[in-house]
């Protein structure tokens, strides 16, 4: 599966490009997206480290060529923000080590080849949850079901401890195995639907902070 465009691309009309890791994730997002304004680009594996790749290899890199084209740029030309095909580029990767790694590598790509998109706030991050915790609380004489989410391994234990202290019952934990393993309703609500999701704008300083963490091991 390759790049799946939207019907109404453009930098000022709310069009979005979702960057996902592969076909399974792309199919999941395509099943809940708005085809008018939301496009999907599956990366098919981890991208090259743009900061350590030679200019010649960068020009020859198929993924980077395809991404340039999807965004509306000619490879090697200046990537001006107002000429981008999308108002937002949303990085949406699995909430595991590989997904975090892919996110860092893509930030290196933007720092190296499209810094203006970072400077103008075009690049965003959507965070899928890693754990879904279901439980019940007593309201009057009835038990009411509730759901909480943890986005990191380190968030799960404190959440469970808080629920235990609050007297929650019927507590169950489900680890979410990537975008393809999420319920369609949850994927739409948490990551895709602009009315309910939370997006984090990634600025140049955020990208450089990620590079500082990962570059030594890449």
Image: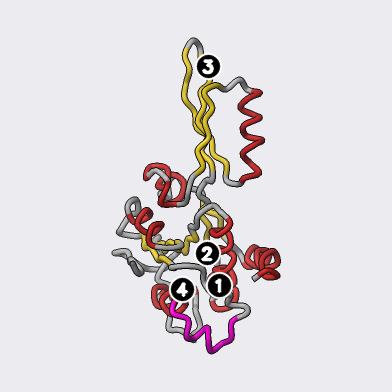
Mark 3 or mark 4: which is in front?
Answer: 3
Q: Which residue is labeled 1 in the image?
A: 110
Disc 2 crowd rating (10 Å Cα; few below 14, some 14-19, many 20+) is many
Question: What residue would you read off at disc 2?
Answer: 123
**Magenta highlight range:** 53-62
Residue that appears at 56% across and 55% down: 200
The residue tagged with tag 2: helix, strand or loop?
Answer: strand
User: SS class of the residue under badge 1?
Assistant: helix
Any mark on residue 82, and which? 4
Picture quadrant of residue 97: bottom right
Q: Is residue 19 left or right of residue 184?
A: right
| CA neighbours of label 3 inside 10 A, class few (<14), some (14 to 19), many (20+) | few
Q: Which residue: 49% across, 77% down? A: 80
Q: Position of residue 113 (x, y in %)?
A: 55, 78
Q: Mark 3 points at which residue?
A: 138
Which label's residue is closer to the chain start, 1 or 2? 1
In front: mark 1 or mark 3?
3
Judged by depth in the image, the label closer to the viewer, 1 or 2, is: 1
Q: Position of residue 86 (x, y in %)?
A: 42, 67
In the picture, the quarter occupied by the N terminus is bottom left
Which residue ends up furthest to the bottom in the rendered image?
56
Do the CB atoms of the residues marked 1 and 2 lie less than 8 Å apart? yes
Q: Which of marks 2 and 4 is nearer the N terminus?
A: 4
* Number of callouts: 4
Considering only order in the chain, which callout, 4 or 3, is on the residue closer to the N terminus? 4
* Residue ID at (63%, 68%): 204
């Amino acid at each position: 599966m390759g790049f799946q465009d939207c019907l109404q691309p453009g930098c000022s009309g709310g069009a979005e490009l979702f960057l996902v890791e592969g076909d399974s994730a792309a199919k999941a997002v395509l099943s809940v997206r708005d085809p008018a304004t939301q496009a999907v680009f599956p990366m098919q594996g981890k991208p090259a480290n743009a900061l350590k790749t030679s200019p010649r290899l960068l020009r020859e890199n198929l993924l980077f060529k395809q991404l340039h084209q999807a965004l509306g740029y000619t490879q090697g030309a200046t990537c001006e923000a107002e000429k981008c095909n999308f108002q937002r580029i949303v990085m949406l990767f699995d909430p595991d080590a590989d997904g975090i790694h892919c996110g860092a590598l893509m930030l290196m790509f933007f720092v190296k080849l499209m810094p203006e998109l970072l400077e103008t706030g075009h690049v965003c991050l959507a965070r899928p949850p890693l754990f879904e915790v279901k439980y019940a609380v007593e309201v009057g004489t009835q038990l009411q079901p509730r759901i909480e989410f943890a986005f990191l391994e380190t968030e799960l234990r404190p959440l469970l401890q808080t629920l235990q202290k609050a007297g929650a019952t019927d507590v169950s934990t489900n680890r979410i195995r990537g975008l393809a393993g999420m319920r369609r309703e949850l994927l739409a609500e948490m990551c895709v639907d602009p009315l309910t999701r939370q997006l984090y704008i990634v600025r140049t300083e955020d990208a450089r902070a990620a590079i500082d963490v990962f570059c030594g091991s890449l």
